[in-house]
Image (cartoon, rainbow, N blue to C red):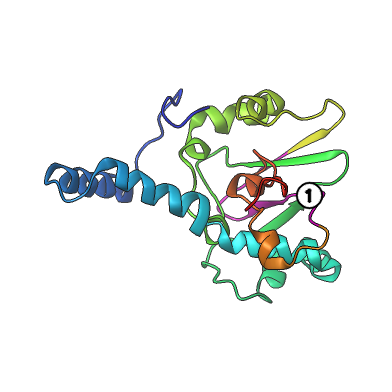
Amino acid sequence: MPDEKPEHHHEHSEHELRAEALETLLTEKGLVTADAIDGIIRLFEEDIGPMNGAKVVARAWCDDGFRARLLDDATAAIGELDVTMLPEAPIVVVPNEPGVHNVVVCTLCSCYPSGLLGISPKWYKDPAYRSRVVREPRRVLSEMGLDLAPELEVRVWDSSAELRYMVLPARPEGCEDWDEARLAGLVTRDSMIGTALPRDPSEAT
């Protein structure tokens, strides 16, 4: 489900319309290129934005006590860390475990824990993802590059204005002696949504 060819379009908010108008004005005047803007957006979507969530996941991978507190009361546990949380809805963290894979969606609009994951990707807001991942999660995840074993149970969690969800991905093998900072580099935005796995330690730099 690539960003460039969404099957449907969501209604743009006032903020989105203003941002698009500003982008058009800047590019028309030659002050910035469209490629530069896209690069900045990708940086905040995929790297800078999800850093808070990555810190949470890395701590849970290293500290069993923190992991237990995170799964019991995520909002309180996250408050223990040096993480700036936006005043959003309470959050629940759901763990990927042997036999279970979790994925998050918002079927009504695009509720999303931006304080932890950064800017939400375009596909997360698209009606195609929002409707299909509930009905055929395996197929949607496969289309996005994540092929799950048939024996895995797939659980779909529906975020709302009252409650947000984040996936705690399973710690990859091959990084048993890594510290938290290095582990955080394996955690991606999509792995915390559930549409991808963490980076392979053997390929991480």
Question: Across the whole image, how many numbered discs are drawn on residues?
Answer: 1
In this view of the protein, which residue sits in the foreground, 77 or 197?
197
Membership of 123 in magenta stretch: no
| Residue shown at the point (72%, 49%) measured from the top left | 201
7 shown above or below 176: above
In this view of the protein, which residue sits in the foreground, 168 or 28?
28
Give the side of residue 116 with respect to residue 150, left or right: left
Main SS category, magenta section: loop
| Residue shown at the point (40%, 29%) measured from the top left | 9
As drawn, the residue found furthest toward the left would be: 29
- Residue for badge 1: 170
Mark 1 belongs to which amino acid? Answer: Ala
Residue 129 locus on image (x, y percent): 56, 31
Quadrant of res 35? top left
Give the side of residue 138 with respect to residue 123, left or right: right
> In the image, which residues are magenta?
156-175
Give the side of residue 116 with respect to residue 200, left or right: left
Quadrant of res 70? bottom right
Residue 202 locus on image (x, y percent): 72, 47
19 shown above or below 179: above
| Residue shown at the point (67%, 23%) measured from the top left | 139
Residue 84 locus on image (x, y percent): 54, 71
Membership of 169 in magenta stretch: yes
In this view of the protein, which residue sits in the foreground, 7 or 111?
7
In this view of the protein, which residue sits in the foreground, 166 or 53?
53
Residue 158 locus on image (x, y percent): 65, 43
SS for dot 1: loop
Q: Mark 1 packing: few (<14 Cα in 10 Å), some, or many (20+)?
A: some
